[in-house]
Image (cartoon, rainbow, N blue to C red):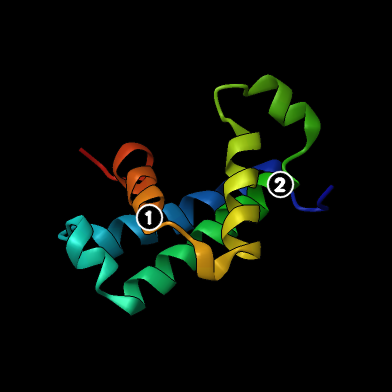
């Protein structure tokens, strides 16, 4: 795995989450999907989250099963390898249900 400590990798996950929250705070889905810069920025930050999650040590994953690393990594792989086929409604759903502050 990574030579970075799990705590640093968690910071690598939390920082992009903060950015996604900041970029989308006053947007609805329509505004989001029509703002290419925000879409690009959000997708890039999801890539970073997925990469950091992929590097978390196995022991950490076992001790923190509430973090669904498989889904995070799977989403990262999907947006990286099918970039032009990314379904923005799925991205927005993840933002709304897993990222945005209430």
**Residue 8 visible to the viewer:** no
Q: Residue placed farthest to the front in the image?
A: 85
The local secondary structure at tag 1 comes to helix
Res 7 → quadrant: top right
Please provide percent x and percent y for residue 67.
56, 30
Disc nearest the viewer among 1 and 2: 2
Precedes in sequence: disc 1 or disc 2: 1
Please provide percent x and percent y for residue 15.
47, 57
Q: Is residue 54 left or right of residue 37?
A: right
Q: Which mark is residue 54?
A: 2
- C-alpha distance separating marks 1 and 2: 19 Å
Q: Is residue 4 left or right of residue 89?
A: right
Please provide percent x and percent y for residue 16.
46, 58
Crowding near pointer 2: few (<14 within 10 Å), some, many (20+)? many
Res 30 → quadrant: bottom left
Image vertical order of residue 78 relative to residue 10, above or below: below
Residue under label 1, please give it. Answer: 18
Residue at point 51%, 57% (across, down): 46
Q: Residue placed farthest to the bottom in the image?
A: 37
Please provide percent x and percent y for residue 35.
27, 75
**Residue 87 visible to the viewer:** yes
In which quadrant is the C terminus drawn?
A: top left
The local secondary structure at tag 2 comes to helix
Residue at point 38%, 58% (across, down): 88
């Amino acid at each position: 795995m990574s030579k970075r400590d799990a705590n640093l990798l968690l910071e690598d996950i939390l920082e992009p989450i903060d950015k996604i929250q900041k970029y989308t705070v006053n947007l609805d889905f329509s505004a989001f999907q029509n703002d290419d810069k925000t879409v690009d920025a959000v997708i890039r930050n999801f890539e970073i989250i997925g990469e950091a999650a992929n590097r978390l040590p196995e022991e950490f994953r076992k001790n923190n099963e509430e973090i669904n690393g498989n889904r995070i990594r799977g989403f990262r792989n999907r947006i990286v390898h099918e970039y032009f086929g990314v379904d923005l409604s799925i991205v927005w759903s993840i933002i709304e249900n897993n990222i945005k502050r209430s």
